[in-house]
Image (spheres, grey):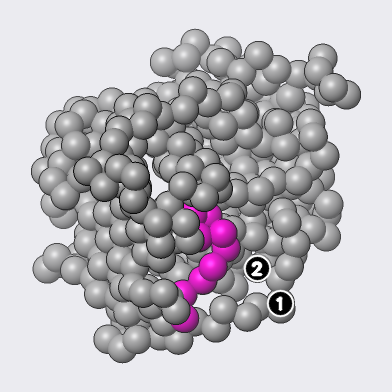
């Protein structure tokens, strides 16, 4: 392996998203990764997370240019607001740094294409991290689909969310104290212009992973509805109907589940149900098994989830493995599958705003490639 002795230097840019702490843990725990530097426009947000991991002060930077110059990262993880993703990709691609964006990909397909263009022009890797893609049940489901266990996928039904983004911090720890309803609207999560809302937060998961399960197939039409609470400007719930030649799929997001799925699965349960021509798979977040129906076992049987290789356990490990094997990514982290998911998200936003179905052309010659 040509990179077997290389230590990959990884920076974290922005701490707007609580998953910055999850990335920091992934860097620390990877045998061939090191933190090159941490930066946020508000140093206090860096300190809150970095203190928990005993990160030395010398790699907590007040100036992002200084981080790039002295830290010399191979990879930068962007955990800014979604609205700022395109600006950061322009900046980092210009510095020759490989990029991991924490989900969602973008606030629009236009911004997604701008990022793809910047990365491909600079010949750097662009990846989008979808944490649900690392859950063993969902990776097991993809393996079983690839093996043909349930035939051709006809439907994917997705429901996911949590009690809300202000109820927890990094490592899914419970946030201390309740945020005043008026004060919460000052956070980017509840601001439309900055990419807030449950649809943008969670629909990308369902749209991207369902496209992965379907081998890249896109729907022909999208119908979406959202629920926006009085006084809010973004939704806390969305329901999307995706029309395919073989039937209808549903993708639902929810801030305000009764419990968080990582503590107690709420009802409806968070995860996926995949319906194929020869069987079905239920794949719920954090489950220790998936339940499969086939003609041989119509009653259903539980299949233990796969023990995953390191490269399939988190975005840092997956990108390192991709770079070490030639810089090509497939699956949800690839910009091609993430772009397909963004098309579904954009169409859903348009449908919710207009109150009418939106036709989504599946032929797309504008962007091609495996990455």
Q: Which stretch did the figure color magenta?
A: 212-220
On the image, numbered disc 2 is attached to which residue? 113
Residue identifier under label 1: 366
Q: Earlier in the sequence, mark 1 or mark 2?
A: 2
Q: Quadrant of the C terminus?
A: bottom right
> Which element is circle 2 on?
helix
Q: Position of residue 261 (x, y in %)?
A: 24, 37
Residue at the front extreme? 296
Q: Residues within 10 Å of mark 2 (few under 14, many from 20)?
A: some
Asked if residue 139 is positioned above or below residue 22 in the image, the reply reads below
**Whole-percent x, y for residue 289 in the image:** 33, 31
Taking 217 as reference, is 288 above or below it? above
The main secondary structure of the magenta stretch is loop
Q: Closer to the camera, 212 or 95?
A: 212
**Is the Cβ of the residue at disc 1 closer than 8 Å to that at disc 2?**
yes
- Confirm whether residue 204 shows in the render: no
Vertical position of residue 332 compared to residue 252: above or below = above
Q: Residue at x 41, y 29 (%)?
A: 305
How far separated are the C-alphas under marks 1 and 2? Answer: 9 Å
Task: Specify whether residue 320 is in view.
Answer: yes
For the image, the number of numbered tags is 2
Q: Quadrant of residue 191?
A: bottom left
Locate residue 155 relative to residue 179 in the image: left or right: right
């Amino acid at each position: 392996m040509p990179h077997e002795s290389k230590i990959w230097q990884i920076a974290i840019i922005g701490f707007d998203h609580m998953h910055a702490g999850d990335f920091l843990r992934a860097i620390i725990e990877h045998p061939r990764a090191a933190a090159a530097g941490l930066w946020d426009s508000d140093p206090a947000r860096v300190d809150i997370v970095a203190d928990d991991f005993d990160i030395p002060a010398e790699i907590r930077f007040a100036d992002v240019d200084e981080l790039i110059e002295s830290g010399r990262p191979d990879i930068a993880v962007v955990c800014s607001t979604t609205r700022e993703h395109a600006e950061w990709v322009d900046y980092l691609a210009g510095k020759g740094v490989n990029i991991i964006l924490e989900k969602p990909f973008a606030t629009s397909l236009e911004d997604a294409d701008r990022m793809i263009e910047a990365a491909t022009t600079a010949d750097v890797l662009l990846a989008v991290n979808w944490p649900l893609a690392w859950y063993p049940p969902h990776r097991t489901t993809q393996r079983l689909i690839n093996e043909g266990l349930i035939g051709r996928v006809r439907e994917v039904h997705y429901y996911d969310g949590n009690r809300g983004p202000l109820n927890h911090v990094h490592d899914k720890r419970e946030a201390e104290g309740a945020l005043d309803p008026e004060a919460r609207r000052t956070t980017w999560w509840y601001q439309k212009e900055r990419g807030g809302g449950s649809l943008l937060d969670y629909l990308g998961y369902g749209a991207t992973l369902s496209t992965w399960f379907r081998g890249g197939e896109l729907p022909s039409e999208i119908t979406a509805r959202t629920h926006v609470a009085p006084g809010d400007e973004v939704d806390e719930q969305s329901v999307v109907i995706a029309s395919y030649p073989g039937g209808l799929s549903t993708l639902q997001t929810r801030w305000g589940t009764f419990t968080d799925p990582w503590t107690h699965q709420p009802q409806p349960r968070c995860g996926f149900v995949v319906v194929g021509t020869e069987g079905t798979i239920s794949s719920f977040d954090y489950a220790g098994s998936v339940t499969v129906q086939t003609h041989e076992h119509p009653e259903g049987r539980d299949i233990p989830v796969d023990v995953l290789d390191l490269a399939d356990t988190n975005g840092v490990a997956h990108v390192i493995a991709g770079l070490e094997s030639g810089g090509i990514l497939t699956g949800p982290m690839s910009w091609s599958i993430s772009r397909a998911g963004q098309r579904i998200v954009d169409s859903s936003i348009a449908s919710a705003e207009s109150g009418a179905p939106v036709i989504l052309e599946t032929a797309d010659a504008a962007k091609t490639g495996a990455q």
